[in-house]
Amino acid sequence: MKRKLFLILVVALFASVAIFAFAACDDGDSSATAKGDDFTIPKGDNIFTEDATYEEILTALENAESLTMVYEDSYCGIQTVDDVVYVDYNSGSKSIAITSSTLCISQRNYYEKFGDQNISSEFKSYYYISDNFNYEINNEQDNIESFTDVSKSLAEYDENKYEEYQSNVVSQFLDLVTKDEFGKLILNGYEGYIKLLGDRIEIVLEQGQVEDGQVTVKMTFGGVNAGSDIPPYVRALESQAEWSDSVYYNGVGYSKMTDEYGSEYYVADSIEEGAVPETTINTLPVRSE
């Protein structure tokens, strides 16, 4: 029950993106393997050592100027229809790299159901502050098409995005581990194991039965204070950025609109109690309609 609850929680935490990629379905190691620069954890501080205490590691994560987490999972289900065995599997890798001014999210997807549906895709998101703008650059491609979306807001409207993600990553770490009587890391009620590798920690939850299939989960935390750079090809897209379609600021949500003359403006479409809408957002006027 604890293991199943964990899977529900981790899906809820990252519900804004898909986190599935190809993995084999066999009796061996079926966890997805993160490959490519997007899933490489940079070498950071050497805090995940055998002699480190739970409190020391937690303090380092909470105060990190940057950190990276890679989530890997695999699901394999088997169904038999008219004496024919079909495999239904999806699994994946997702990387989150965070600094005080950048947030990079990457994931890949491969899904096959009953041997006749094959879907593969990649999704990358970059959020970062540059020259007082907070850019959001999304690129998605699958086996049919691809698209790139580039938007920006004034930095003041999104400055807490990075803190929120770091808090979520630390909370995920706290859900996975606790300490023993000697202050050392142990799994927090899960079946699996922990590997302390100096500049990173690997937490593997062993396969367990979930509905009609099996799931394996591996999470790696590292890159503490290693920093993070936005790739040059991403920065080259800045000139294409348009004002964000939606902005949330000081208790008010705004949606961008365009009038019959082609002029852009924002409308305050959600207002918390006591909040007062701005007169302008992203240099555009705020109108009632």
Image (cartoon, rainbow, N blue to C red):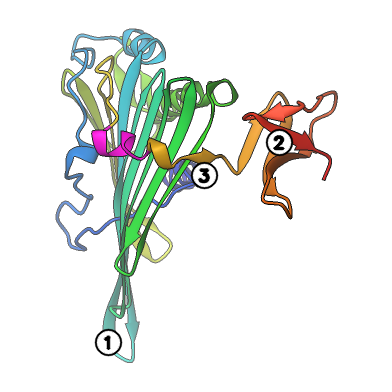
- The 10 Å Cα crowd at callout 2, few under 14, some 14 to 19, many 20 or more, is some
| Range of magenta residues | 231-237
| CA distance separating discs 3 and 1 | 34 Å
- The 10 Å Cα crowd at callout 1, few under 14, some 14 to 19, many 20 or more, is few
Looking at the image, tell me whether mark 3 or mark 1 is earlier in sequence order.
3
Q: Element at badge 2?
A: strand
Percent of width and height locating residue 285: 73, 33
223 lies left or right of 7:
left
| CA distance separating discs 2 and 1 | 52 Å
Percent of width and height locating residue 74: 29, 54
Residue designated by label 3: 12
Amino acid type, callout 1: Val
Is residue 76 something one can see in this rendering? Answer: no
Question: Is 109 placed above or below 45 here?
Answer: below
Quarter-of-image position of residue 27: bottom left
Residue 84: which numbered mark, if any? 1
What residue is at 31 percent from the left and 37 percent from the top? Answer: 236
Amino acid type, callout 3: Ala
